Image (cartoon, rainbow, N blue to C red):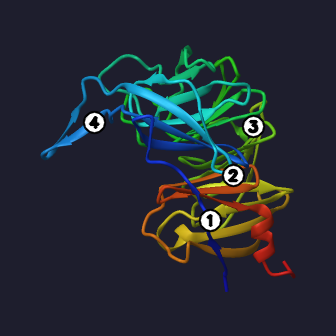
Amino acid sequence: MSKMISLANGIELPKVFDGLRRIQTSVVDTNVLAALYSNASPQWLNVGEEWKMVPDPSGDALIVLFDQAGQAKPLRKFRIQSAWVVFAVRPQGGWLVGRTSRRIGTEDVRDTTIYDAEGEAIHLLNGGGAIAFIQVSKDGSFWIGHDDEDRSDGAKLGGITYFAASGAELFHHNWTGPDHVDGMPMWCCYALNVIEGSGWAQYYDSMLIRRFEADGSARSWMTENNGATALAVKDGIVARIGRYDENRYRISVFRLLEPPNSEFIGRLEFDIEGERPKYLNSVDGKGDTFHIVHDDKWYRLTWREMLAHLPASQ
């Protein structure tokens, strides 16, 4: 039987900051959450029974850092090209913003922007399209996890791409990747976590957990087939927070053995303030901690809390 954890005492996140609405969040580290506020619009709007492209979806944007005391630190304002974005804050200052999909019908494949600490765009690059996740390593290099929701030409559907801090692409791996990536199948990136320079991901539909190194090598572990929204990793053990239907509130914990083997340790379930809402706004993993944003509040679930709820014998 699964053990239950109830999340409480969430940190308040304002819906509006400096006249801009909150459109996205991103975990900076275990104790800091970044929220993106903007008046940009989506690239497409549903008008009647058809979708129409917005001529200019761009707008002002502001990233605000929130700590565990609820203190807010706004960064410099900047411009973004669309509200359909994912972003990450760089440890050395500045940030990255990637469009989740490219503007169909244009030849411009530069979909990811690097900003400095003053909010100036210093590099515009081809992130590969179909951008589902961006996470940054301590040295400023960054990882992009791809899904299959981009209809534009040349999009990197599925897999992962690794970039140097300068924005130079170092490698991309997907289901057509070479055998030296261990020959295991992979498709859409369902979850991404970056720990000490390694990228951890889970893939549809094999539900592989895969660890990528900065040199492009990788190791894979097979797990039960129920998907994931985020990963938390520590000391050779991976916690995976669920994805579909009743699995949305389940956490499965595995010990990683000699690849591709893993050992199921136990399962936890959670609610928020004693309830299970139909939808969660955001679930992310950073290091050994899960971060859940729901109903304008930010909750954390640490590795220590998860282990404390597993049976002692496990």
The residue lying at 70 percent from left, 22 percent from top is: 164
Tell me the crowding category of disc 4: few under 14, some 14 to 19, or many 20 or more residues within 10 angstroms, Cα based: some
Label 3 sits on a secondary structure element that is helix
Quadrant in which residue 40 is drawn: top left
Per the image, the residue denoted by label 4 is: 44
Q: Earlier in the sequence, mark 1 or mark 4?
A: 1
Residue under numbered circle 2: 68
**What is the three-letter code of the residue carrying label 4?**
Trp
Which amino acid type corresponds to the residue marked 3 in the rendered image? Answer: His
**Cα gap from disc 1 to disc 2, whole angstroms:** 11 Å
**Residue type marked 1:** Asn
Say left or right for 282 vs 265: left
In this rendering, position of residue 225 left or right of residue 261: left
Using the image as rendered, state which of residue 88 and residue 252 is in the foreground.
88
Quadrant the C terminus occupies: bottom right
3D distance between C-alphas at marks 4 and 2: 36 Å
Q: CA distance from mark 3 to mark 4?
A: 40 Å
Q: Is residue 245 visible?
A: yes
Q: Which mark is residue 9?
A: 1
Q: Which residue is mark 3?
A: 180
- Judged by depth in the image, the label closer to the viewer, 3 or 4, is 4
Q: CA distance from mark 1 to mark 4?
A: 37 Å
Q: Which label was assigned to residue 90? A: none
Position of residue 312 in the picture relative to residue 98 (left or right): right
Is tag 1's residue or tag 3's residue first in the polypeptide sequence? 1
* Helix, strand or loop status at disc 2: loop
Q: Is residue 32 above or below residue 249?
A: above
Q: Please rate how many residues cluster around mark 1, counting C-alpha atoms within 10 Å: few if below 14, some from 14 to 19, many from 20.
A: few
Q: Please name the residue shown 40% across and 17% down the image.
A: 108
